[in-house]
Amino acid sequence: MAESVRGPRERMVFSAAQLIRRDGVAATGLRDVVAHAEAPRGSLGHYFPGGKEQLVNEAVEWAGRYAAGRVARFLAAMGEEPTPSGLFAAMVGQWADEYRADGFAAGCPVAAATVDCAQTADSTRSAAADAFACWTRPVADALAGMGVPPQRAAALATLMISTLEGAILIARAERDVRALETVVRELGPLLDAAVVGRG
């Protein structure tokens, strides 16, 4: 959805996700979200009667849907013969490209919300779990479509996403894409070997 056609509610959810991925939940204030979204101040209570927790949860859900949608775009860009390693490289490459271009200030909003809120807000923990599931399903479906047995595809999708999340953390800590490049190189052959007939 183009930025220009988002209404104030959608802009606030998007802005919350962007600020959470940069600053974490605790440091993301409601005023910051309203300012970033260029939304009317009074609209916050109107659209989010549950306050910050509701807004955070919706931002986390948005992030899960966004990540899931990226899977289809990666597959489309891979042409007629996608591979598990190629899909993983595309997933990781998105982050490596961002970090090379813009620096290492931002991470995954779902991970940030999990770290900040999992023990204090059960609804946010649940929203984060749902977001990861929303992202994992299309990855598993894509792997199955490439010839990975369905049960193994689900396990490998979890492996791919958890590996990527860990590499994002290391890349931000080191201010270097080394970890992202390493996981692509090391995990790629394992993923391709899971395709029936290749292993």
Image: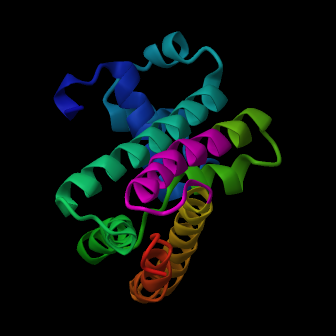
The residue segment tinted magenta is 128-151
Residue sitting nearer the eye, 151 or 11: 151
Task: Give the image quarter of residue 85.
Answer: bottom left
Residue in view at x 58 percent, y 36 percent: 56
Residue sitting nearer the eye, 199 or 143: 199
Q: Position of residue 12 (x, y in %)?
A: 41, 29
The residue sitting at the front extreme is 197
Task: Give the image quarter of residue 180.
Answer: bottom left
| Residue 95 is one of the magenta-drawn residues | no
Q: Main secondary structure of the magenta part?
A: helix
Residue 20 visible somewhere in the drawing: no
Residue 44 visible somewhere in the drawing: yes
Q: How many marks?
A: 0
| Lateral position of residue 165 relative to residue 117, left or right | left
* Whether residue 192 is situated above or below residue 136 in the rendered picture: below
Q: Position of residue 73 (x, y in %)?
A: 25, 50
Residue sitting nearer the eye, 151 or 69: 151
Residue in view at x 50 percent, y 57 percent: 108
| Lateral position of residue 18 relative to residue 46, left or right | left
